[in-house]
């Protein structure tokens, strides 16, 4: 069963998605690079330019995945910094004219999480927004209620120099978890999910 709620928030694209699944063994760094690849493939299929990895958005996404995994909260407003615009700014991402965030939990693979996001109108809108030019991706595995916590931070800044190199692998470590099982749709015993989506763009 799928539940989808539509809620506008601060002229910024938001999405949240949960899929219940057993976590598969993971290489978190390789998985985030794969999410970037799959996200850009979806954009290419829609005739859009690829998103460039941005280290500041990546830091914000990774930090928020950690908050989701350790706080017991699964919303866009968890932790000590409840506004993702503020989280992005704390990571050094400033001067933006559009930002957005997708979160998901319980999906064991990049293919499963991107498929889940693409099946949800609000998440899909973020991934396929022509307003965004940059992305950061975070993943924490092996903790919390759902086992895997994914975050995509999207942004665009006037005059930004885009670097389409893959995300750096040197600073992160692989974190194997789970029992080795993986479901194609990221769901064990069905696809229970919840979401809230909003849309627009705005200035900082």
Image: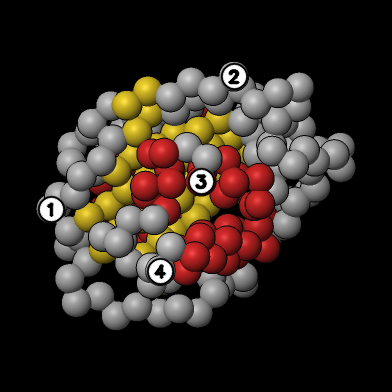
Q: Quadrant of residue 58?
A: bottom left
Instruction: Point out the residue furthest to the front here.
Output: 46
The secondary element bearing badge 3 is classed as helix
Q: Which residue is mark 2?
A: 1
User: What is the spatial separation of the Cα atoms under label 2 and label 4, in whole angstroms?
Assistant: 31 Å
The secondary element bearing badge 2 is classed as loop
Query: Crowding near pointer 1: few (<14 within 10 Å), some, many (20+)?
Result: some
Q: Which residue is mark 4?
A: 47
User: What is the spatial separation of the Cα atoms under label 2 and label 1, in whole angstroms?
Assistant: 36 Å
Q: Nearer the viewer, residue 1 or 179?
A: 1
Describe residue 77's horizontal placement relative to residue 35 as left or right. Answer: left
User: What is the spatial separation of the Cα atoms under label 3 and label 4, in whole angstroms?
Assistant: 15 Å
Residue 20's tag is: none
Q: Residue at x 52, y 51 (%)?
A: 138
Residue 118's tag is: 3
Foreground label between 2 and 4: 4
Describe residue 190's horizontal placement relative to residue 92 as left or right. Answer: right
> Quadrant location of the N terminus?
top right
Give how far across and how far down residue 72 sits, in percent. Answer: 53, 23
Q: Residue at x 22, y 33 (%)?
A: 9
Q: Quadrant of residue 56?
A: bottom left
Count of numbered marks: 4
User: What is the spatial separation of the Cα atoms under label 3 and label 1, in whole angstroms?
Assistant: 26 Å
Query: Crowding near pointer 3: few (<14 within 10 Å), some, many (20+)?
Result: some
User: What is the spatial separation of the Cα atoms under label 4 and label 1, in whole angstroms?
Assistant: 26 Å
Q: Which residue is mark 1?
A: 203
């Amino acid at each position: 069963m799928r539940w989808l709620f539509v809620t506008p928030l601060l002229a910024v694209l938001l999405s949240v998605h949960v899929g219940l699944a057993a976590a598969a063994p993971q290489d978190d760094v390789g998985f985030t690079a794969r999410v970037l690849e799959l996200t850009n493939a979806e954009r290419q299929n829609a005739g859009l330019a690829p998103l460039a990895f941005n280290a500041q958005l990546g830091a914000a996404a990774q930090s928020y995945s950690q908050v989701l995994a350790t706080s017991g909260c699964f919303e866009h407003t968890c932790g000590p910094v409840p506004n993702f615009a503020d989280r992005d700014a704390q990571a050094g991402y400033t001067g933006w004219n559009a930002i957005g965030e997708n979160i998901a939990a319980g999906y064991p693979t990049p293919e499963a999480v991107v498929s889940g996001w693409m099946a949800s109108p609000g998440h899909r809108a973020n991934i396929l927004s022509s307003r965004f030019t940059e992305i950061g991706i975070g993943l924490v595995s092996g903790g919390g209620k759902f086992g895997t916590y994914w975050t995509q931070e999207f942004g665009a800044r006037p005059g930004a120099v885009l670097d389409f190199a893959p995300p750096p692998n040197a600073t992160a470590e692989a974190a194997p978890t789970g029992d080795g099982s993986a479901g194609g749709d990221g769901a064990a015993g069905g696809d229970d999910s919840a979401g809230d989506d909003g849309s627009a763009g705005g200035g900082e």
